[in-house]
Amino acid sequence: MGLASQRKDVKWSDKGPSGEDSANYAGGKYIDDKGYVRVLKTDHPKNIRGYAYEHRLVMEEYLNRYLQPWETVHHINEIKVDNRLDNLFLCSHREHSAIHKEGHKATAAHKEKMRENVKKNKPHTMKKNYAQKKVIENRLKRPHI
């Protein structure tokens, strides 16, 4: 008997099993890094690498159409895996933002702290200021002629 890789009675492949044959196959569903349920739906116009958000699919099935670009689906109880139709609310992006901001008012002390942090850091100018600072430092290091 020779090497195992030279056996003619075994079908060899560089690829492992895929789809339903794979040990990792979970019925075409998984929970993404944001906590949303994604469903294998390669024919969906808004699929991301073949998967679409389940809450959007549930709402689309109920409406019998695809969602418009300006429409979003809100989980009423804010549990992202609870995709029952009675837990979903169709709204615009603006309405959705307002729903999440409701009851989350920043206190005066918190607003003041944020203002102080912006004055200190100003992230949009940090790179520019850093570059200017380096130029000035290099000029100061040079000997004067």
Image (cartoon, rainbow, N blue to C red):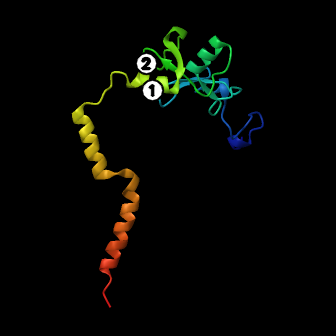
Residue 94 seen anywhere in this rendered image of the structure: yes
Residue 5 found in image quarter: top right
Mark sitting on residue 78: 2
Mark sitting on residue 97: 1
Residue 129 placed where, x, y %? 36, 62
- Please name the residue shown 42% across and 21% down the image: 99
Residue 139 placed where, x, y %? 34, 78
Looking at the image, is 58 positioned above or below residue 127? above
- Please name the residue shown 51% across and 27% down the image: 93
The answer to whether residue 33 is left or right of residue 6 is left
Q: Quadrant of the N terminus?
A: top right
Residue 68 found in image quarter: top right
Q: Amino acid at mark 1?
A: Ser
- The residue lying furthest to the bottom in this view is 145
Residue 117 placed where, x, y %? 28, 46
Query: Badge 2: few (under 14), some or many (20 or more) residues near its Cα, within 10 Å?
Result: few
- The residue lying furthest to the right in this view is 8
Q: Amino acid at mark 2?
A: Glu
Q: Between 121 and 8, which is closer to the camera in this rendering?
A: 121
Residue 26 seen anywhere in this rendered image of the structure: no
Q: Secondary structure at mark 2?
A: loop
In the rendered picture of this protein, how many numbered marks are placed on residues?
2
Residue 89 placed where, x, y %? 51, 15
- Mark 1–mark 2 Cα distance, whole angstroms, equals 13 Å
